[in-house]
Amino acid sequence: MATIKEQRDQKRKDVVEAIVIRHEPVH
């Protein structure tokens, strides 16, 4: 069972990964 903190951390990680992917230059 995920705690609220774990859910919040997961959501933030998803957001950070999405931002990184969006700003990553195409190689």
Image (cartoon, grey):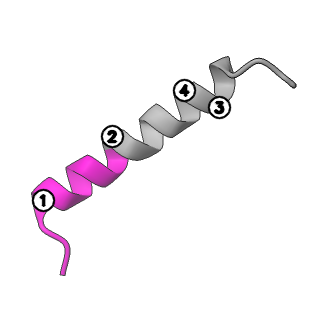
Which residue is found at the position 12% from the left and 55% from the top?
5
Find disc 1 in the rendering and name its residue: 4
Residue 23 as seen in the image, left or right of residue 26? left
Find disc 4 in the rendering and name its residue: 19
* In the image, residue 20 above or below residue 3: above
**Label 1 neighbourhood size at 10 Å, few (<14), some (14-19), many (20+)?**
few
Give percent across and percent down for residue 2. Answer: 19, 72
**Label 3 neighbourhood size at 10 Å, few (<14), some (14-19), many (20+)?**
few
Q: Amino acid at mark 4?
A: Ile
C-alpha separation, residue under disc 2 versus residue under disc 3: 14 Å
User: Which quadrant is home to the N terminus?
Assistant: bottom left
C-alpha separation, residue under disc 1 versus residue under disc 3: 26 Å
Determine the secondary structure under disc 3: helix
Residue 12: which disc? 2
Q: Amino acid at mark 1?
A: Ile
Determine the secondary structure under disc 2: helix
Determine the secondary structure under disc 1: helix
Place residue 26 in its image quadrant: top right
* In the image, residue 24 above or below residue 21: above
Is tag 4's residue or tag 2's residue first in the polypeptide sequence?
2
Total label count? 4
Is tag 1's residue or tag 3's residue first in the polypeptide sequence?
1
Is tag 1's residue or tag 2's residue first in the polypeptide sequence?
1
Q: Which residues are magenta?
A: 1-11
Which residue is found at the position 12% from the left and 67% from the top?
3
Give yes or no for contact between labels 4 and 3 (Cβ–Cβ under 8 Å): yes
Residue 18 as seen in the image, left or right of residue 6? right
Is tag 2's residue or tag 3's residue first in the polypeptide sequence?
2
| Outermost right residue | 27
Magenta region, main secondary structure: helix
C-alpha separation, residue under disc 4 versus residue under disc 2: 11 Å
Which circle, 4 or 1, is nearer the viewer?
4
